[in-house]
Structure formats: C-alpha cells, structure tokens
C-alpha cells in the first residue's frame, strides 16, 4: 500500500491529489482548483457507447469523462481534447496512472480546430460537459482556470455543437450535460447543426425541486422525435442519494 | 333540483350530457364522442392570465379551456375558436349554460384565418391544447370529429404557433400543452416565430415513468432563457392522484 502510494505519487505535481473513483480507476485532481462534479458522472452514465465506437470528449478538463467511459464501456478509442495546458497535462497523467494509454488519448488544443485536426465525420460518439455560464454573465471566477472551465470564455455552446456535428459520422451520437435554463437555445443550435435531439433526461435534486441539469442526446441527421425519460432524482432526503444515483456511482 | 335539471336540459341535444366541473361551472360534452382530458385542466392551471388580458384559446373544442380560465382568472375577455361546427356549437351552449356570455365568446372558424379576422397583435394571452398526433401517423380515429381533435388534419403545430405569434402583442404569452416526443420541434418552431420558450413543466404519470405531457410558455420577443419547473407528478399510486393534482382540480 505504502509502496503503491509512492509509485503513484510520481504522477503528481504540487497541489494535486489522487482520488479513488470507486470503479477501479483513479483521477488526479487539483487539491484547491476545479474538481469534477456529478455532471461528469451522469454524462458518462447517460452516454451509450459501443465497443467499436471512436469517441471524442470535448472540453475534457482533467479527463474525468474519458476515464469513466473507459470504465463503463468497451471502446478502445476514446479521445479527449482540452484547451488548458494544466488540465490536459493532468488528464494525460491520469491516463498513465490508470494504465489506460492504449484506450485513451488526451490532446491539448482548441475544440474549434478539432475538425481540421482529426478530420470531418470520423467519430461515432462525441461527449461534452462544457462550461455552462454565458460569456460575461455572472461572477467570473477569480481563478482563471476555473473561470475557463465554468464560463464560455474560450468556447461557446455553439462552438461545442458545431464541432460535434463536424466530427460525427452521419447517424453518430452527441451526448451533453448542461443547465436547463439553456434548453431552448441548446435544442435550436443542435437542430441548426443537424444534431436532432433524440433523448433527454432532466436531473432534479429533489422530487419537488426545479431540475439543475439536463442530459441530452442528439443524432446527426436523425428525424424529429425526442424521448423524454423518467426524472433522475438525486436525493431521497438531504444528504442521502437515491438508489439510482448510488448505482450510477458504482458504475451501474 | 329537478327543476334545475329541466332548466339546463334545454341546452342539450341528443347524445349530450352536462358534466359538473366541480368549480362552480359545468360543461356540455358528447356522451360518446371526444371528452376533455387532464391536458385541458393542466393547461388552464399552467396559464398565467391577468385581469386586463385579452385571451384567445385556439382549437377550443367544446370550450373547456375558456370555461376553466373564466373560473381561475379575472379576465373578462376570453375568446375561443374552433373549426368543427358541432364542437363550437357545444361550446357556445356551455357558455350560455354557465351564464358566461359576458366573459367568453366562441367563434366558429379556422385558426389559420384568425389573424385576418381578429387582427394582428391584439391578444395578451393565447392558449392551445392542439391535436397531438402528426398528420397521418398512428391510427386515424374512425370518428371524424375525434380524429380532427387528435390528429393534425386541419391544423399543424406550426399553424398553431404561427397563428399565436401573429395574434399576440409584443411581450404577450403563449401557453400550450403537448406531447413530449414533439418537444424539440415545438421549441424550434416557437423560436422561428419569435415565441421564446420561457417556462416548461413536464407531467409524469408516476415519479418513475416517462412524462406524457409537456406544458410550455412562450413569450413573444422574449430573450433566450427558460425556467424548467419541478416535475408535475399525477399519481402517487395507481388510482390515487397526488395532492397537487387534486388541488388543481379543485381550482387551486
């Protein structure tokens, strides 16, 4: 155990720690900066990925979504792209730490250049847990890295959706988690780029509260018909997750 | 009592009956044809109508929505338009039966001609519980009146939304109930006609089932930001309404 800790600590730089994802994998995170949230966990559980799918995770941050997808699916071709050097580097080291270098590749770069870099219509699946907040609205976070992860400073919702559409093959699937207040804009933009909304699930913190997340699946070139799924309720009472959330965290 | 029945029966034609709405009003319905459903009740409860609002209910059918709005709101200018002569006639007689002729007017006609007939930008509120099923999809009902009420035979979702937009003043509100499988198309069409989706509520029959209705509010010329409300759950167990549904039926 002590030896393993020493062994793994070689992947760390100061102000970082290793978090056990409770699914056989671990993640390197900043001890004081941006840390992954339930959004990434729910997105990875919502996405349907086949063994032969080539997957691209946009705005991958510290690589949480690719690592969760590696745990949950059989795909051997999972890529992630991140614009912030520090986060991309953290993600790359988490891939090494988990010995997932044969299945996951992390790229440093701007998602807006991804279609030129990787090619048009080359992925079966694109996932994204993007910054939620509109440009300069709301308080900008004093930590620049956190501000970029949370606000549309370096990429907008339209950048994400346009890029996803260009990267996907015809019939390919796009999975995104976002805030419900942007649902109308999200659907409009998806349809503008031929990613027809096909499946949606609202995440309600409590059964009697407004939803705070929306999970959406779009299909490139799909027809106009959406399945709205049963509500995903997070807490059965304050501090106690519902059985479904506990199952998702266990990897179910 | 017997005398009241006799008094009211003068409003009826064969194969009709009077249903007590449990809110001080009654409705004439066909004993064997199309009868109002929970959709109309939830739509009337979802709509926010001010005392001075001029209201138009499109595809008003037997007039259930105008009568519920008369019970729930203070508006003295509630109109309803219906293309089927038999239904429009039934609605007119229900207005008389309830002595609501000073507050409700029922018009026979095609909603697509409503802006020419009533004028552009003249209503503060438009409501609609339209036919849900796409054109020739699904089994057409053998009863023609019922088929017209349920299928987009005489008007499409786009007809409803375009008409609503033309009838509404800038900032006016549109309230509609529909099926969730058409949510993406609904939002796209609303935005195309400058009715920005501002508020949405999904109606789930049970807490662990897919929603079967969606209530939506659009504002003419509104900005892009939608509030998704807490789930509306119909049954707490089979055959037993939740307290919220019971309250809505009581007019609360």
Image (spheres, coloured by chain):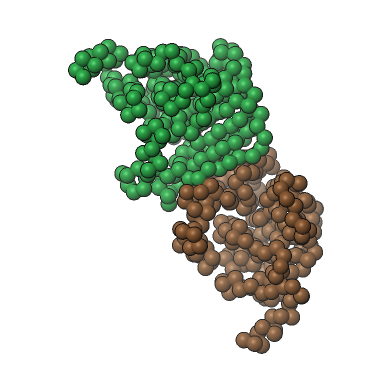
Chain colours: A green, B brown
Q: In which quarter of the image is residue B143?
A: bottom right
The answer to whether A54 is drawn above or below residue B176 in the figure is above
Residue B122: image quadrant is: bottom right
In x, y percent, where is residue A190?
60, 31
Picture coordinates of residue B45, whole percent (x, y): 56, 60
Residue B92, how many percent across, how many down?
74, 69
Residue drawn at (56%, 71%) of the image: B23
Viewport quadrant of the N terminus of chain B: bottom right
Q: Can residue B33 be seen in this view?
A: yes
When the figure is inspected, residue B126 is found, relative to residue A220, above or below; the finding is below
Q: Which residue is most to the left? A: A2
In the figure, is residue B62 to the left or right of B40? right
Using the image, determine if residue B62 lies above or below residue A194: below
**Image point 60% across, 35% down: which residue?**
A197
Q: Which of A42 and A22 is in front in this view?
A: A22
Relative to residue A82, is residue B226 depicted above or below?
below
Residue A141 horizontal/vertical position (percent): 38, 28
- Can residue B224 be seen here? no
Q: Nearer the viewer, residue A14 or B232?
A: B232
**Tally of numbered discs:** 0
Residue occupying the point 27% across, 15% down: A8
Who's the residue at 38% across and 38% down the image? A247
Name the residue nearer the viewer: B237 or A192. Answer: B237
């Amino acid at each position: 155990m002590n030896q393993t800790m020493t062994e793994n600590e070689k992947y760390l730089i100061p102000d970082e720690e290793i978090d056990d994802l409770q699914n056989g994998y671990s993640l390197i995170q900043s001890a004081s900066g941006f840390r992954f949230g339930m959004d990434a966990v729910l997105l990875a559980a919502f996405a349907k990925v086949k063994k032969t799918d080539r997957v691209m995770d946009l705005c991958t941050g510290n690589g949480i979504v690719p690592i969760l997808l590696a745990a949950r699916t059989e795909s051997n071709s999972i890529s992630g792209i991140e614009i912030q050097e520090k986060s991309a580097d953290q993600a790359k080291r988490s891939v090494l730490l988990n010995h997932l270098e044969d299945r996951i590749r992390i790229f440093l770069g701007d998602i807006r250049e991804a279609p030129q870099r990787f090619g048009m219509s080359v992925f079966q699946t694109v996932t994204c847990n993007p910054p939620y907040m509109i440009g300069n609205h709301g308080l900008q976070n004093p930590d620049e890295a956190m501000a970029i992860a949370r606000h549309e400073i370096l990429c907008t919702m339209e950048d994400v959706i346009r890029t996803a559409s260009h990267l996907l093959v015809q019939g390919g699937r796009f999975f995104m988690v976002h805030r419900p207040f942007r649902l109308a804009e999200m659907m409009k933009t998806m349809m503008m780029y031929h990613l027809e909304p096909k499946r949606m699930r609202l995440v309600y913190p409590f059964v009697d509260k407004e939803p705070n997340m929306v999970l959406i699946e779009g299909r490139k070139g799909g027809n106009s018909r959406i399945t709205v799924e049963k509500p995903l309720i997070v807490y059965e009472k304050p501090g106690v997750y519902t059985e479904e959330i506990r199952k998702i965290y266990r990897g179910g």
